[in-house]
Image: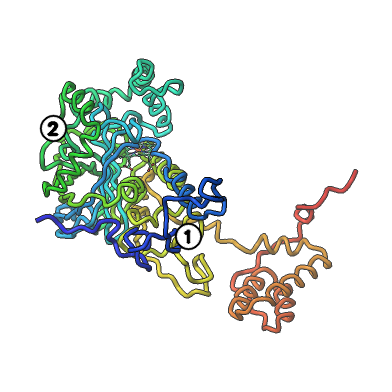
Amino acid sequence: AAPEVRTATGVETDAVPDARAQQEPFLTTSTGIRLRDTDHSLKAGERGPTLLQDHHLREKITHFDHERIPERVVHARGAGAHGAFIGYGTADSVCRAGFLREGVETPTFVRFSTVLGSRGSADTVRDTRGFATKFYTAEGNFDLVGNNMPVFFIQDGIKFPDIIHAGKPHPDREIPQAQSAHDTFWDFVSLHTEAQHHTMWNMSDRGIPRSYRMMEGFGVHTFRVENDARETALVKLHWKPRLGVHSLTWEEAQLIGGIDPDFHRRDLYDAIETGAYPAWELGMQVLPDEPDQMFAGIDLLDPTKIVPEELAAVQPVGLMVLTANPTNFFAETEQVAFHVGHLVPGIDVTDDPLAQARLFSYVDTQLTRLGGPNFNQIPVNRPHVETNDMLRDGFHQHAVHAGVAPYRPNSLDGGCPFQAGADVERAFEHLAARVPEATKVRAQPASYDDHFSQVRLFWLSMTPVEQEHIVRAYTFELGKCFEQAIKERQLQCLANIDARLCAEVATGLGLPAPEPTVGLADVEPSPALSQVGREWPAD
Ligand code: HEM
């Protein structure tokens, strides 16, 4: 049976009813004023000029004028669908991600795409296809942003603008199929010979799929996974279509492209509408996490290489079924924002330089494409778990954040528990000894623990008059705090810098001076430091 899914517009996370559904009995302005006419502008007489005063006219036209957002810089042409993923539990021995556990059902949204064509281009062209999946897991969103080919053109993301420029239409004519655009593409791939593997996949029948439903998907990069025992493995991720892999012949693609440029989009939509739900099994090739990150002579950090299935079988770990079309193409398919960095505990990226560049690129481009930093509040991008970030304000902010202290730790808004071991990267700290280059920590060296000795140096280099100014400034500013505990905590800091400084400020505040909690640094006033920030004496 097909799993039940919620569409993005059906997710009830809004605090207020969906006021934008445009299904109220009366036509209104965007601010709810009922209208009696939307066909005639307000004029100075029946044949007179239109009045600037006509708010409804201006609102209607202004909004229309701004309806378009930029298309994606790549993968602009796409089609999406909602579904659900059910874990088999077979990955438990290598990966602790909750959505892979047996029977766990996770809503998903998938967007298939071509790479090079613009938003209105034909579906049946020869190209790589995007296969991007957002898993709304109980541990937050996991995005698997893959393609229908297991390798990529380039080994380092720094070349990505170049390969795309070489493949996109020429700046002068903007004719995708122009001879010159072929020149630049073939120029690139013959100069950057690492592109030859992906190019051959493009020239094969895989370059013209019969249907999105009949494509494989690949994570391309090697990922590092971790199990409950904190043992790691390297994996390649595969989607295997239940319908098998099928392609169009070149002649079929030409004909269909002329007759129905929306062929793949229509095929996906119709299949789902008629209940022929497309399905894929997610599979893993599990490889040992060796210090050199090699397997059978294959560099696992090189995205132009596959690991042949004869050497490492693809083991099924779950099933995804797509069961619902988007309610609104723009709201869901166009505004969905995938990111290679959306990872859940138990899955991490590797140091593949292509993957590393992607970590920067997606959010950067989405800031422009989706108009500011709050696009994760768009329904299709919202996780299906509570969020508690410290992000504030920005264009299109929909949340009304409470509290006064958007920083942690703070002593004003109460505690904020952190989930031990929740960090994706922290899970790999223990790799330090074995795979030093795989180690990422959120930590700092012990040398960063000295917070007071140079403050003391500064204080001791001041003249008596300057020291008096400092005492007065601390006393005045701290005197403005309401919270006694905050004054006392700052006095403790002053005690760790200098006893006299602390005592004088404490007296001014009418509070006792605490004892230092760290050994005071044995520093001498420094003539050199006392010159810092001052004008040099004239010769
Ligand atoms: C978009 C896959 C490499 C930058 C996409 C999409 C897919 C994809 C599937 C479409 C997402 C959607 O449907 O919304 C891949 C794969 C890669 C790869 C599999 C290599 C293994 C790169 C690299 C960069 C890059 C190296 C840049 C350094 C982008 C950008 C978008 C995009 C900017 C548009 C995103 C948006 O506007 O939301 N990619 N990509 N990609 N990719 Fe990649």
Residue 515 at x, y percent in the picture: 63, 78
Q: Which badge, 2 or 1, is on the more N-terminal residue?
A: 2
Residue pictured at 30% horizontal, 43% vertical: 145
* Mark 2 within 8 Å of ligand 1, using the beta carbon: no
Q: Residues within 10 Å of mark 2 (few under 14, many from 20)?
A: some
- Looking at this rendering, what residue extends furthest in the front direction? 46
Q: Which kind of residue does numbered mark 1 sit on?
A: Leu
The quarter of the rendered structure image containing the N terminus is: bottom left
Q: Secondary structure at mark 1?
A: loop
- Which residue matches tag 2? 246
371 shown above or below 473: above
Left or right? Give the position of 242 relative to 454.
left
Residue pictured at 33% horizontal, 31% vertical: 117
Closer to us: 448 or 150: 150
Q: Which kind of residue does numbered mark 2 sit on?
A: His
Residue 401 at x, y percent in the picture: 47, 67
- Looking at this rendering, what residue extends furthest in the left direction? 1
166 shown above or below 513: above
Q: Is residue 451 visible?
A: yes
132 shown above or below 530: above
Q: Secondary structure at mark 2?
A: loop
- Looking at this rendering, what residue extends furthest in the right direction? 539
